[in-house]
Amino acid sequence: MRGFDDLVAEGAAVPVDGWDFSWFEGRATEERPSWGYARLLGERMARARRALDLQTGGGEVLATIPEAPPTLVATEGWPPNAALARQRLASLGGRVVEVGEDARLPFPDESFDLVTSRHPVTVNWTEVARVLEPGGTYLAQHVGAGSLRELIDFMMGPQVVGKARDPERARAEATAAGLTVLDLRTEALRIEFFDVAAVIVFLRKVIWTVPGFTVDAYLGRLRALHEQIESDGPFVAHSQRFLIEVRKEPRGPIGRP
């Protein structure tokens, strides 16, 4: 087995732009949700006329759709990812707009019949409702509360699990924004890290897992994790995911409520 210093140096040097996780092959594994988000996304996009993908990252998932709608727009708040998304989505005719996660969406009311997102940092349900046309839908896979709790607690000590990513909170907020929840499913999925380099790359890439993570600041915990993997095998954690689909109800006929 490679030494701690070599693995740390490797983990610190791997580029982490975008949401391509192919580097982790052979270094870490993660179960996939049974609903198959990429497949669902492709099906919905093929039926859409005007679609918006929020917080698209580098466009990795959106670029896999077999057929793009006539109008395809994506938002991304981090400029390096936005640049990658522009390259990936060009062949689909996709347009990428740089928008912060918490910012108001720069689109007119009722601009889209489909809004999607995979693992958004935050969701402004009022804005989703505003840009959806009546009868339009929002389909997304969100990260659930307590995701990667085992890794977070190992690195930072025991943490209180917040409610911000609770699926029932998403249901309540979507409903409060005037949207109808059509589907809400949750799953816990096993993740295994086979060496400390994989953990370092993951924490550098998914920066909200351990806020402010740097190798130097967490060197002691990384060494402890390396020693645990050497003695006990892969470090096991669990990601929490939920699928949510909502609809903005169509307007009734004139003269009816």
Image (cartoon, rainbow, N blue to C red):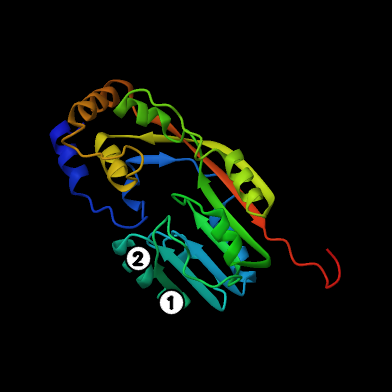
Q: Amino acid at mark 2?
A: Ala
Instruction: Please name which of the two marks, 2 or 1, marks the residue nearer to the observer.
Output: 2
Q: Position of residue 50 (x, y in %)?
A: 58, 73
Answer whether residue 81 is visible to the viewer in this image: yes
Q: Is residue 208 left or right of residue 176?
A: left
Residue 27 in the image: above or below residue 113:
above
Q: Which residue is mark 1?
A: 91
Q: Is residue 190 left or right of residue 70?
A: left
Most foreground residue, 223 or 229: 223
Looking at the image, the residue that sits furthest to the right is: 255
Q: Which type of secondary structure does the marked residue at label 1 adopt?
A: helix
Who comes first in sequence, dot 2 or dot 1? Answer: 2
Q: How many marks?
A: 2
Q: Residue at x 66, y 49 (%)?
A: 175
Q: Position of residue 27 (x, y in %)?
A: 32, 41
Q: Which residue is mark 2?
A: 82
Q: Residue at x 15, y 36 (%)?
A: 216
Q: Residue at x 46, y 74 (%)?
A: 94
Q: Which type of secondary structure does the marked residue at label 2 adopt?
A: helix
Q: CA distance from mark 2 to mark 1?
A: 15 Å
Q: Quadrant of the C terminus?
A: bottom right
Looking at the image, the residue that sits furthest to the top is: 231
Judge the density around disc 1: few (<14), some (14-19), many (≥20) Cα neighbours within 10 Å.
Answer: few
Q: Is residue 146 left or right of residue 171?
A: left
Q: Amino acid at mark 1?
A: Ser
